[in-house]
Amino acid sequence: MKVLGCLHAHYSNIRYIEEALNGMNVELQHFVDPGLINRINHDHTFSIEEAKRKVIEQVQWIENSGVDAILITCTNYIALLDENYQSMKPIIKLDEPFFKEICDLSRPLKIVFTNPATVEGTINRLNQFANKDSKSLDIEVHIIEGAFKLVMEGQLEEHNRIVAKELEKLIKDSTQAIAVAQLSMVEASKQINSDILTPLQTLVPAIQKTL
């Protein structure tokens, strides 16, 4: 049995990964550190270089814990990890198979966030990914204000209600394809429409291929 080490910025992401990989012959080891993102958001003396070093430390810790591969589920962690970092283990970045799916779309996309702090890093990485593949993107960002703090407070039902209501409105009012950018939004999206793109839809094949 292969061992997959999963690096999360919040405990709520664990169940999404476990549900997605249920039935696969893989053992999951979860490593959770919400402190880094909290410090980035609140300590203005904490530099990006310090944050990058912390992410590398976390990845190195997981590398040496007996895993066969590493999954990073936090967009900010992914954005902070140096592209030139040479890992001892294969690293699966949650957003990359998701980005490929987006780049293959034939119509405009509205990509929805609840955490404003992840928008810049995600969109920058998406544009870099598209440029490497010589793809042109037609994307609009939409932020659901006030929802993400409910995740951090453990109020998942209320979070899902707010997100589902907003997604339903967006689908009704828009001709664009709709995608949710964060794992925390997956459950709400499933309640509304199976055509909403989520990071989980493309993750399982990527993990199977890597392992």
Image (spheres, helix red, strand yellow):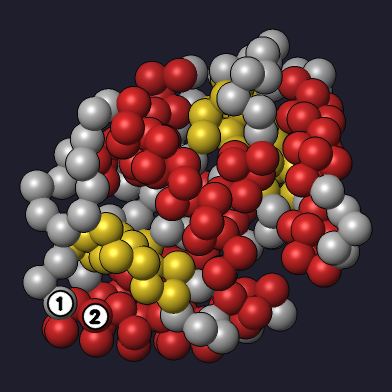
Camera-nearest residue between 154 and 181: 181
- Circle 2 Cα neighbour tier, 10 Å, few/some/many (<14 / 14–19 / ≥20): some
Can residue 141 be spotted in the picture?
yes
Identify the residue shown where x is 37% and y is 73%: 142
Rendered view: 42 above or below 50: below
Rendered view: 75 above or below 180: above
Q: Which mark is residue 94?
A: none
Locate residue 200, reporting x and y percent: 39, 48
Q: Which mark is residue 174?
A: 1
Q: Which residue is mark 2?
A: 170
Alpha carbons under labels 2 and 1: distance apart: 6 Å
Camera-nearest residue between 131 and 208: 131
Locate residue 32, reporting x and y percent: 75, 49
Circle 2 — which element? helix
Camera-nearest residue between 173 and 90: 173
Classify residue 181 by image quadrant: bottom left
Q: Is residue 91 left or right of residue 123?
A: right
Identify the residue shown where x is 62% and y is 82%: 150
Q: Amino acid at mark 2?
A: Leu
Classify residue 68 by image quadrant: top right
Rendered view: 13 above or below 202: below
Q: Amino acid at mark 1?
A: Ser
Identify the residue shown where x is 38% and y is 34%: 129
Quadrant housing the N terminus: top right
Can residue 22 be spotted in the picture?
no
Locate residue 201, reporting x and y percent: 32, 47
Identify the residue shown where x is 56% and y is 69%: 115
Q: Tell whether label 1 touches label 2 (CB within 8 Å).
A: yes
Camera-nearest residue between 184 and 170: 170
Circle 1 — which element? loop
Q: Is residue 81 left or right of residue 143?
A: right
